Image: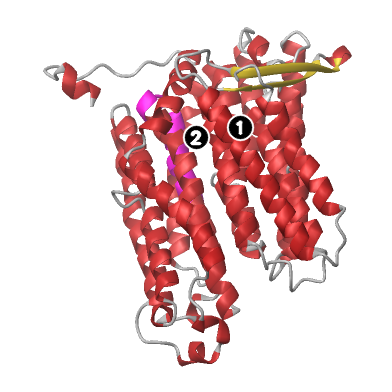
Amino acid sequence: MSNFPFLSVLTVAPLVGALVVALLPRRRPELAKQVAFVWSLLVLVLSVLMWIAFKIDGDRFQFRESYPWIPNWGVHFTFAADGIALVMLMLIAVLVPLVILASWHDADSSRRSVPAYFALLLVLECTMIGVFAAADVFLFYVFFEVMLVPMYFLIGSYGGHQRQYAAVKFFLYSLVGGLFMLAAVIGLWVVGGKTFDWQALSQVDISTGTERWLFLGFFLAFAIKAPFFPFHTWLPDAGGAAPAGAAALLVGVLDKVGTFGILRYCLPLFPDAAKWFAPWALALALIGIIYAALLAVGQNDLKRLVSYTSIAHFGFIGVGIFAFTTQAGTGAVLYMVNHGLATGLLFLVVGMLIARRGSALISDFGGAGKLVPVLAGVLFFAGLASLALPGTAPFVSEFLVLIGSFTVNKPVAVIATLGIILAAAYVLWMVQRTTQGTLNPALTEIDGMRRDLNLREKVVIAPLVALIVLLGFYPKPVTDVINPAVQATMNDIGKTDPAPAPGTSVQEASR
């Protein structure tokens, strides 16, 4: 099974499905939805088989494939996956079918084509898989840029209020970041002996000044994509305007390309520059945690609030990456997965509430739990997961980030901990204002607010709730896959974990 070309097939399969869905007649919207859903399930099955075939104690990069593309430039269709890429690919495979189900009626009221909407979701899946599977820097850059196109149309054509403004802003920010990376990619090709192969480039010795400039080119692109403060302003607009399903993928997966890129490219290819820039990156991450959390507290738009919470969460991921310990690094990667599950669930549930009320404003709700108690309960659970309540998956990753950071930089860990307090404030405030308290009389006059979760919505929610609880109590299957890749990344930059304090037993140090 390990010889099967999993990564190339996984990349191409959603694109083929998108073509099939796009060619279906507009008068058959239900058929388009069904085909898109079944196709995404096939991708999920293939991803599960790849997970089973992955050997935890095997090579760092597995399922490697390489096919010539532009030989004169040294460009190849090269795919490979380590543990970090593998968990992100599984996250994509899990989220996309659920997003398709959750988006079943998102395009019905639009004048746009329903088949086109679901075809765009599959194209987006193709580009997301490609960007995490690429082991050729040029191929990664191509997927990094092409990924903007389907999301641009999902926001601009099927979004809500100010969708065109949000789509253009999203596209321009990401395009500018891509231009910085393009300059760095070209520079890397020149100093790297005219090759784009990741493994070959990781062995190249680059002068200090050049390495710092190249690191900066990649880092700016990834900081915008993540987004880190102060490059974050596009996300609340894009997340607020996008359909709920597309927003779940935008925040749950697309933004992780930024943090994944730092782990895969900035750290191993430019290790000395990464260590030199680390204090600045940690400062940006800490500012993002506090600043975004404060802004989230003051939001009246549900989707913008969730978007700001994600900026704060990306600050935690940044702290975990640049702490340069295996605990914090594993926590950062696990955070990428758990944030995708928890915030994906939160966006989808918020979308269900908005669809019923016809408004995203928190002030238009109030006491909704009396009319839709199950939906309100799921919103409460998703909020608790978002603030990393013990017993939910995000708690494990946040704890690993903080404990791994505390061993090397106590002030950073202490400041980051303040973000947990603010998270409780904005989550509980949101839940209280929307589902608790006195019932807003206007809600009783809206037909949608009399309907609690239907079977389709329960099918969407149940797997995410189950995974959040399961990984909250038993994250070992995921951390076992992540740990070797994180350890290899730490070795790339010459970092080792601090020795246990004197008097600490072996058992205590290993906990």
Residue 206, image x and y in percent? Answer: 64, 10
Residue 427, image quadrant: bottom left
Q: Quadrant of the C terminus?
A: top left
Label 2 sits on a secondary structure element that is helix
Residue 256, image x and y in percent? Answer: 57, 40
Q: Is residue 125 visible?
A: yes
**Camera-nearest residue between 289 and 153:** 153
Q: Residues within 10 Å of mark 2 (few under 14, many from 20)?
A: many
Residue 53, image x and y in percent? Answer: 54, 23
Q: Which residues are magenta?
A: 311-327
Q: Which residue is painted at 78% across and 41% down in the image?
A: 15
Q: Quadrant of the N terminus?
A: top right
Question: Which is nearer the N-term, disc 2 or disc 1?
Answer: 1
Residue 168, image x and y in percent? Answer: 76, 56
List the residue tagged with mark 2.
281
List the residue tagged with mark 1.
219
- For this view, does 115 lie left or right of residue 125? right
Residue projecting furthest to the left: 503
- Labels 2 & 1 near each other (Cβ < 8 A): yes
